[in-house]
Image: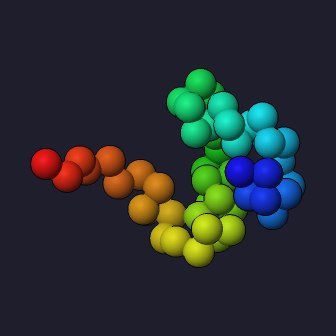
Amino acid sequence: MQNLADAINVEYSQISRIERGLINTSIGVAYAISQALEIDIKDLFDFKKDN
């Protein structure tokens, strides 16, 4: 996660809190995360569970 935080210029703790659902984030940060992970932003919000 530190590499992701560095890539999008946010604190590691912010990434951790987003991942754990403790805070909401802006669409701009969500977009930056998707770009750093090289995925479509919509994939960050695909909560379908495989059964």
Q: Position of residue 44 (x, y in %)?
A: 47, 55
> Can residue 5 be seen at all in this image of the molecule?
no
What colour scheme governs how the chains and residues are painted in the rendered image of this protein? rainbow
What is the quadrant of residue 34 in the picture? bottom right
Apparent side of residue 47 relative to residue 2 in the rendered image (left or right): left
Q: Where is residue 20 in the image (x, y as percent from the top left)?
A: 56, 32
Q: Looking at the image, which is closer to me, 27 or 1?
A: 1
Q: Position of residue 5 (x, y in %)?
A: 79, 52
Q: Looking at the image, which is closer to me, 16 or 44?
A: 16
Q: Looking at the image, which is closer to me, 29 or 22?
A: 22
Q: Residue furthest left?
A: 51
Q: Is residue 45 above or below residue 13?
A: below
Residue located 79% across and 51% down the image: 2
Q: In this view, does 12 lie above or below 5?
A: above
Counting every numbered tag in the picture gives: 0
Apparent side of residue 36 relative to residue 38 in the rendered image (left or right): right
Residue located 51% across and 64% down the image: 41
Q: Residue furthest top?
A: 22
Q: Position of residue 33 (x, y in %)?
A: 65, 59
What is the quadrant of residue 35 in the picture? bottom right
Q: Is residue 3 above or below residue 11?
A: below
Residue located 69% across and 61% down the image: 32
What is the quadrant of residue 17 in the picture? top right
Residue located 59% across and 25% down the image: 22
Q: In this view, does 4 lie above or below 10?
A: below
> Can residue 49 be seen at all in this image of the molecule?
yes
Q: Residue furthest bottom?
A: 38
Apparent side of residue 23 relative to residue 2 in the rendered image (left or right): left
